Amino acid sequence: MKDQAAVSAIIEELKRLYPAAECSLPFDPEKAYELLFSVRLAAQCTDARVNMVTPVLYARFPTLEALAGASEEEVGEIIHSTGFWRAKARDIVAASKMLVEEYGGRVPDTMEALLRLPGVGRKTANLVLGDVYGKEGYVCDTHCIRITGLLGITDGSKDPLKVEQQLRACIPPEESNDFCHRMVLHGRAVCVARRPDCQSCTLRPWCDHWTGPEAEDAAE
């Protein structure tokens, strides 16, 4: 895998390419639960579709208490187009109730507490910790897992937990959240899974799968 100097160079190039490392799921900073539920809706669904649905959902249920009091059928009717809507509606209502009843209406700021919420896994928890609370957040989504493997930052594992552990060993905590957002941006703009634009990719000097002259220079 890459040495720390190469990892640092990749981080700096990503900063140059994507200075605004923003999440593609907008939310009200005063309502952190919006991000929590948007990520749940994004499972097996595009962010674009989620961003069409959430304004309707949050207009119908403008507070966490309103969501906690909603029926799964009411929520499901609104989020139907995101797929797997029954499970998503169940998790959103159950998590809303837990947040109101056990956490005083506040989204918790620790991994352990977040993982207690229905429908919340490590990817969601890391995103909330990074985007909401400014803590370290190693969000290992499909883009991050795939591209860090191609670059040799990780060993190519597809196991999100293993990739997260490997990233924690080489990506500084203060860089983690933005780094993962930039992986997503790069995966959508350049290193697209089915048609990667390797020739235009400025990360190619560090990429284990690039065989051009830059790869030869980097190996010397």
Image (spheres, grey):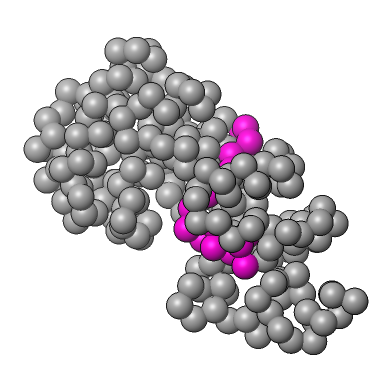
Image point 28% across, 25% down: which residue?
96
Residue 94 found in image quarter = top left
**Which quadrant of the rendered structure holds the C terminus?**
bottom right
Place of residue 149 in the rendered image (x, y in percent of width and height, measured from the top left): 61, 62
| Residue 61, above or below 15 | above
- Magenta-span inclusion, residue 137: yes
The spot of residue 28 in percent (x, y) is 43, 37
Residue 57 in the image, given as x and y percentages of width and height = 23, 42
- Identity of the residue furthest to the left in this view: 73
For residue 139, say whether it is visible.
no
Q: Quadrant of residue 77?
A: top left
Above or below residue 189? Residue 57 is above
Q: Residue at x 34, y 20 (%)?
A: 99
Q: Nearer the viewer, residue 117 or 72?
A: 117
Picture mark count? 0
Front position in the image: 130 or 156: 156
- Residue 104 appears anywhere in the view: yes
30 is within the stretch colored magenta: no
Residue 84 in the image: state x and y as whole percent.
20, 50
Of all residues shown, which one is farthest toward the right?
220
Residue at 26% of width from left, 34% of height from top?
92
Q: Nearer the viewer, residue 27 or 186?
A: 186
Left/right placement of residue 142 relative to residue 43 reads: right
| Residue at image point 54% right, 33% down | 129
Give the quadrant of the N terminus: bottom right
Q: Nearer the viewer, residue 160 or 44?
A: 160
User: Magenta span covers which residues?
Assistant: 134-150
